[in-house]
Image (spheres, rainbow, N blue to C red):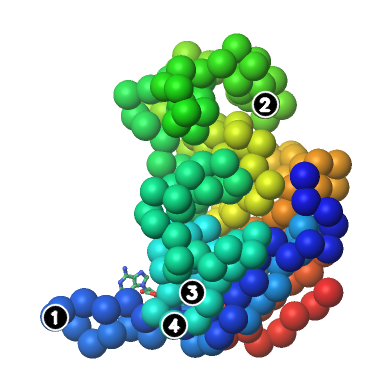
Amino acid sequence: MAEDNAVVLRLEAVQKQYESADRDPVPVLKGITLTVRHGDSIAIVGPSGSGKSTLLNILGSLDSPTRGSIQLDGQELAHLSEQELASIRNKKIGFIFQSHHLLPQCSVLENVLVPTLAETGKATTGAVERAKRLLDRVGLGHRLTHRPAQLSGGECQRAAVVRALINQPSLILADEPTGALDHSTATSLANLLVELNRDDRVTLIVVTHSVELASQMGATHQLQDGAFTSTDA
Ligand SMILES: Nc1ncnc2c1ncn2[C@@H]1O[C@H](COP(=O)(O)OP(=O)(O)OP(=O)(O)O)[C@@H](O)[C@H]1O
Ligand SMILES: [Mg+2]
């Protein structure tokens, strides 16, 4: 595992505009510079439409910037093939999206195991045990064979969190992970993320509207119209 203080992510002057043939380009990110070190916990806050999800997708190499440089563990993402990026994403990054993106035809347990199938197509006993343990920890131990349509919105989100953790990523990118949850479920999910950061030194970047969750992070970056307006360490 990387040492504390090692730079995990380095963004320099990152700009993003969405282009389309029939509309003017939409400029979203206007020059983001950010250094994230191993073991950091960072909240990204800002109004709706300010570019938070766009930034998170770019941090996780799901989207590429229009201009600027992004390095993950010292590697310039623009220099990597789509296949190399997919492998890095699978091994190093756990994504928790704004909507859960669970596969409707699969059970909770199967959904959680999807990221472990990339290598051999089959989940190991260890992965199944870990999945069950984590599902238990988020209160879904009794829902292993349910499909997403048979779960509440909050339960789907909790299953998606476990899916993000299953490969023991060194970096978790979470987009409003507690947005759809009631207060007590949100608190226990926030606690799980905080524990992973504190105890396992997982680097955590969380987009959130929750002041409570943001206050538990080591630093908060405020995004406004595609630029950081303030940074509180
Ligand atoms: N594919 C796209 N094509 C064109 N414009 C887009 C696209 N995706 C996002 N946008 C625009 O980019 C801006 C930033 O979107 P983004 O989803 O990053 O905002 P956000 O800060 O995550 O908002 P929210 O808090 O509502 O989730 C918005 O104005 C949105 O309309
Ligand atoms: Mg968003």
For the residue labelled by badge 4, is the local secondary structure a helix, a strand or a loop?
strand
Q: Residue at x 74, y 48 (%)?
A: 202
- Amino acid residing under circle 3: Gly
Q: CA distance from mark 1 to mark 3?
A: 21 Å
Residue 51 got which mark? 3
- Amino acid residing under circle 2: Leu
Which corner quadrant of the image does residue 184 belong to? top right
Q: Earlier in the sequence, mark 3 or mark 2?
A: 3
Q: Residue at x 78, y 69 (%)?
A: 219
Q: Earlier in the sequence, mark 2 or mark 4?
A: 4
- Pointer 4 residue: 67
Q: Residue at x 45, y 31 (%)?
A: 118
Q: Nearer the viewer, mark 3 or mark 4?
A: 4
Horizontal side of 14 relative to 72 (left or right) equals left
For the residue labelled by badge 1, is the local secondary structure a helix, a strand or a loop?
loop
Q: Earlier in the sequence, mark 2 or mark 1?
A: 1
- Amino acid residing under circle 1: Asp
Q: Are marks 2 and 4 in contact (CB under 8 Å)?
A: no
Distance from mark 3 CB to nearest ligand 1 atom below 8 Å: yes
Which corner quadrant of the image does residue 107 belong to? top left
Instruction: Give how far across and how far down residue 12 sits, in percent.
Output: 59, 81
Horizontal side of 19 relative to 95 (left or right) equals left
Instruction: Give how far across and how far down residue 140 sits, in percent.
Output: 61, 23
Residue 118 got which mark? none
Give the residue furthest to the left.
Answer: 22
Q: CA distance from mark 2 to mark 4?
A: 39 Å
Q: Earlier in the sequence, mark 3 or mark 4?
A: 3
For the residue labelled by badge 3, is the local secondary structure a helix, a strand or a loop?
loop
- Pointer 1 residue: 22
- Amino acid residing under circle 4: Arg
